[in-house]
Amino acid sequence: MRLARLTDFDYIGLHAYFLTICTAGRTPFFKDARSVDAARGHFLPTATAYGFEVVAYCFMPDHLHGLVAATRADADFKRFVAMFKQRCAFAHRRRTGTVLWQENYYEHVLRSDENYPAIVGYILGNPLRAGLVRAVGEYPFMGSERYSLEMLSDFVQSAKLPWE
């Protein structure tokens, strides 16, 4: 099944996106540091190469949440996600012989950066809500190119998403 993207929006330019990518069959590939490090090793540099800053990310066992913000007027979100998924999936398949990602992904285009703290809080609150840890700082598979761990922990308190 293909998800429809916004028809009147080109996904190019100085925009921010809340992104969720699920693993194939929701298989928990991201339960260990080696798998997460391999995926993160593609996510962060690919974002930079395509003109995005990773505001926050969290690799859950069977999905990735990210908040990315364009840093250039020519930043192309759809190309960034396609290249990240392709590069990461290729390396994963070579290492394990298995398919990593489901066919599509989910995104929400932010209307302004005023929602960053709530979205960051939601993203980083995932391991808490899933019962994987008791405190944000205990979960090793998340981070930010913009905020310190202390700031990230503060955002978890305001985790109600603006579109909920």
Image: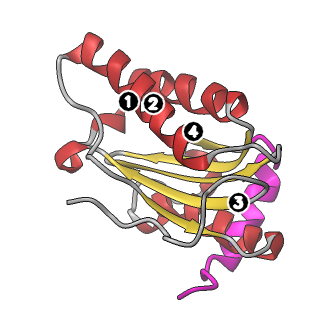
Quarter of image, res 54:
top right
Q: Earlier in the sequence, mark 1 or mark 4?
A: 1
Of residue 126 and residue 139, the one placed in the foreground of this image is: 126
Residue at figure coordinates x 53%, y 88% from the top left: 164
Q: Which residue is mark 1?
A: 32
Q: Position of residue 79 (x, y in %)?
A: 54, 39
Q: Earlier in the sequence, mark 3 or mark 1?
A: 3
Q: Are marks 1 and 4 in contact (CB under 8 Å)?
A: no
Q: Are marks 1 and 2 in contact (CB under 8 Å)?
A: yes
**Which mark's residue is nearer the viewer, 3 or 1?**
3
Q: In the orientation shown, which residue stands out farthest toward the front?
A: 8
Q: Position of residue 18 (x, y in %)?
A: 58, 62
Residue 80, label in figure: 4
Q: Position of residue 130 (x, y in %)?
A: 38, 63
**Which mark's residue is nearer the viewer, 3 or 2?**
3
Q: In the orientation shown, which residue stands out farthest toward the bottom?
A: 164
Q: Which residue is mark 3?
A: 16
Type of residue at label 3? Ala
Q: Secondary structure at mark 4?
A: helix
Counting labels gives: 4
Residue at figure coordinates x 70%, y 60% from the top left: 16
Mark 1 Cα shell of 10 Å, populated few (<14), some (14-19), many (≥20): few
Q: Could you tell me how far apart the alpha carbons at marks 1 and 2 are, in whole angstroms?
A: 6 Å
Can residue 163 be seen in the rendering of this structure?
yes
Q: In the orientation shown, which residue stands out farthest toward the top?
A: 94
* Magenta-highlighted residues: 145-164
**Which mark's residue is nearer the viewer, 1 or 2?**
2
Left or right? Give the position of 84 relative to 131: right
Mark 3 Cα shell of 10 Å, populated few (<14), some (14-19), many (≥20): many
Mark 2 Cα shell of 10 Å, populated few (<14), some (14-19), many (≥20): many
Of residue 103 and residue 91, the one placed in the foreground of this image is: 103
